[in-house]
Image (cartoon, rainbow, N blue to C red):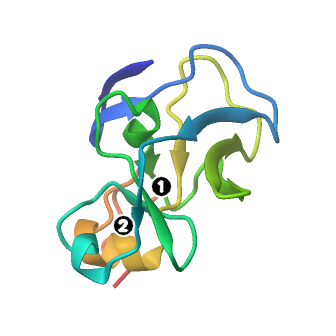
């Protein structure tokens, strides 16, 4: 379910997920990897050195999974397809999060405001 979260919109579990269970696939158009494109499109997901997935269309529900420094899910590359998989049990209605990675956070988020970092005086990324 997509609904309001502390970061704007977020993806929330419509049911409980077991550890290791696939939650959703990150889908979109496959585009050649380009460092130029990285600066303008926040929804590019690197598949390999040659290809990215442009997940910017709103029909890509996985684009609503927000960043957390203490995530409950992770992105897994399975033969060039990206899946969001539960790292631990996720309860129904809990927000689904994964770690976007230091480079992404530094480039686009700058100051991490995920729930794990909320209230900390220093940004763990900087």
Residue contact between numbered discs 2 and 1, judged by CB atoms under 8 Å: no
Q: Is residue 9 left or right of residue 68?
A: left
- CA distance for labels 2 and 1: 14 Å
* Residue 31 placement (x, y as % from top left): 39, 61
Q: Is residue 122 visible?
A: no
Residue that carries the numbered disc 2 in the rendered image: 120
* Residue 32 placement (x, y as % from top left): 40, 69
Answer above or below: position of 110 versus 116.
below
Answer above or below: position of 51 versus 57.
below
Q: Is residue 28 visible?
A: yes
Quadrant placement of the C terminus: bottom left
Labels 2, 1: front one? 1
Residue that carries the numbered disc 1 in the rendered image: 68
State the image quarter where residue 64 is shown.
top left
25 or 85: nearer the viewer: 25
Q: How many marks?
A: 2
**Of the residues under marks 2 and 1, which one precedes in the sequence?**
1
Quadrant placement of the N terminus: top left
* Residue 82 placement (x, y as % from top left): 61, 51
What residue is rendered at 31% in x and 78% in y? 106
Answer above or below: position of 109 versus 14.
below
117 or 55: nearer the viewer: 55
Tag 1: Cα neighbours inside 10 Å, few (<14), some, or many (≥20)? many
* Residue 51 placement (x, y as % from top left): 49, 68
What residue is rendered at 74% in x and 47% in y? 87
Tag 2: Cα neighbours inside 10 Å, few (<14), some, or many (≥20)? few
What residue is rendered at 42% in x and 43% in y? 28
Answer above or below: position of 22 versus 75.
above
Q: Is disc 2 placed on a helix, strand or loop?
A: loop
């Amino acid at each position: 379910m997509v609904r309001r979260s502390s970061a704007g919109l977020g993806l929330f579990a419509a049911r409980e997920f077991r550890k290791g269970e696939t939650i959703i696939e990150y889908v979109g158009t496959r585009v050649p990897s380009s460092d130029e494109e990285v600066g303008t499109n926040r929804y590019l997901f690197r598949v390999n050195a040659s290809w990215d997935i442009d997940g910017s269309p709103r029909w890509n529900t996985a684009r609503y999974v927000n960043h957390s420094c203490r995530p409950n899910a992770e992105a897994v590359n399975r033969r060039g397809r990206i899946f969001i998989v539960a790292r631990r049990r996720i309860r129904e209605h809990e927000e689904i999060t994964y770690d976007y990675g230091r480079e992404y956070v530094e480039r686009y988020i700058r100051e991490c405001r995920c729930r794990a970092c909320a209230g900390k005086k220093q940004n763990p990324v900087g």
